[in-house]
Image (tube, grey):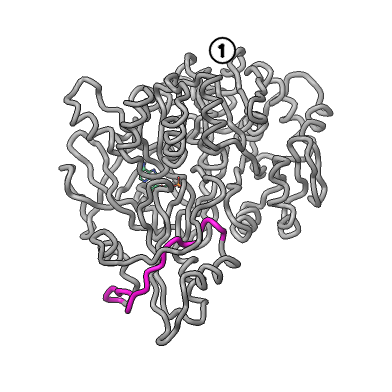
Amino acid sequence: MQNDFPLTLQHVQRRMRSCSPDAQVVTLMAPGELRRASFAELGARIDRLARALQRLGVQAGDRVATFAWNNQRHFELYFAVPCIGAVLHTLNIRLFEEQLTYIVNHAEDKLIFIDDSLVPLLEGLAPRFEHVAHFVVMGDGDAGSLPNPLRYEQLLEEAGPGNFDYPAVHERQAAALCYTSGTTGNPKGVLYSHRSTAMHSTVVMGPDANLLSSRDRILAVVPMFHVNAWGLPFAAAMAGADLILPNRYLQSEPLAQLIVSERPTMMAGVPTIYSDLLRYADEHRPDLSSLVNCICGGSAAPVKLLRDFQERHGVVINHAWGMTETSPICTLARPPVQMDEEEYWRLRATQGRAVAWVELRLIGDDGHEVPWDGESTGEIEVRGPWVASRYYNDPSGDEKFHDGWLRTGDIGSLDRGGYLRITDRAKDVIKSGGEWISSVELENEVMSHPDVVEAAVIAKPDERWAERPLCCLVLREGAQTSVEDLREHLRERVAKWWLPDEFAFVEEIPKTSVGKFDKKVLRAQLADGTLEGRVAVEARGRPAPAPG
Ligand code: AMP
């Protein structure tokens, strides 16, 4: 028998420092201004941070939250927090106030590490956080009215140099926590153990997955607050690959400049990021050809996008599927190149095949498994060592987990080679630019308008955002309410990017036999053109893309 060697992030940290001391984390501090730190330097800073956390009284199992962009300090927290046995809780900066307050209190976060540029988003909420003892501000900017603010660099300075003696950590201990709002009801927390994170990082490096090595430079555009940036910070540390972090500069121009100057081999992001970048690249012709091994997921990646990038700019983007509940990588489309071109692109368009250790099955409406024939569809169920077995302290989501399988709420088919194609979604949510919009909450807000009798919100496919909400509604008889009135009503109640661009005024919302809104019928009507959307007069869109 072999040693029962624990699969923990402590190993990843030791490996990063000893095997790849010269690999780098590069952070875009401002357009054209980069900050570089070698893995050796980062190791020393992580030791200081670990000591600082201990001095602040952080104990094993405590939740330490981050509210930050993709940057070097966030990377340091990714290792220091789990390696002392605490839990890294990445807060999604795109969520709105009620969701954030709920999550911080539900997780019982003890500390929040916050980028200075994000202070205005949290300072008003701080009094509502029940367990937070300190805010640690990262950067020199103003701490605003945050109570008990500490300064990150000062903490590291005071912690002093020298190796930190990490406590023993069990591989089944929680390393990280991330909440998903892609469900009905309150956001749900998913805990990742050291073991699941270590295994996920190992497998996502491998062939038929991301294919990473110490020769790679990874540009992680996917946020570190959304499923640990798809595990890439851990995988980069493990592989000894450079990690390039764009901070808050997610617009196409700074991203293109970063790609031209840093020559990453791999980039990870949602389709919206890529489609914006493609438009920019077509117009400005930056040299993006270093990107030979990208990954796109979070929403369905249109094959035209993948193909145009490859044929016009030499950029290869692989399509992947996963969820917060699955750490996230489950499938990735990397068909062999030596095959008929049409077949090759047909497979590239799919969500791909399960990576090692992930198992899939499809369950039909009758509760039985459907065959892998490429045509029959069913709800995708998944199991594996990095698939959650329940939500963190929230039994309300228990029905999604059964017999070791997770019901994903995604509908699809599998072919005999195991290629997954997602065709629909059973869960009642909309994913726009990589972040979730709750149809139920939008409906409730629309229905609070005195002239609205009933309202059902469905996703409408959108070239740029993947999906946008379309609100179907029935008005009180004789009401003259306009689209502008409705948007005005919603503007005070929901985040700006949730505002539906289109409203369809209908006689009646179709209902199921038990009287629920039958969104399947609405979606079918949308697809066959019988649902007329009245387009809002006001310019559409949100201030900045929200990559997932
Ligand atoms: P999240 O937990 O926010 O990462 O969202 C996971 C969900 O996003 C999945 O259950 C799908 O509904 C959707 N999703 C993720 N990747 C893809 C993809 N490649 N194609 C279609 N839908 C996707």
Indicate the amino acid at tag 1: Cys
**Which percent across, then down, holds residue 243?**
55, 24
**Which percent across, then down, holds residue 439?**
44, 63
Q: Which residues are magenta?
A: 495-514
**In the displayed structure, would residue 491 be above or below residue 85?**
below
- 271 vs 349, left or right, is right
**In the displayed structure, would residue 509 be above or below residue 353?**
below
Q: Which residue is mark 1?
A: 19
At x 50%, y 57%, the residue is: 539
Quarter occupied by residue 166: top right
Was residue 498 drawn as part of the magenta stretch in this picture?
Answer: yes
**In the displayed structure, would residue 124 be above or below residue 333?**
below
| Residue 433 visible in the snapshot | yes
At x 68%, y 51%, the residue is: 121
| Residue 387 visible in the snapshot | no
Q: Can you say which quadrant of the picture contains the N terminus?
A: top left
Foreground pick, 421 / 530: 530
**Which percent across, then down, holds residue 229?**
52, 36
At x 46%, y 62%, the residue is: 500
Foreground pick, 194 / 141: 141
At x 56%, y 23%, the residue is: 11
Quarter occupied by residue 59: top right
- 279 vs 154, left or right, is left
User: Farthest residue toward the bottom?
Assistant: 478
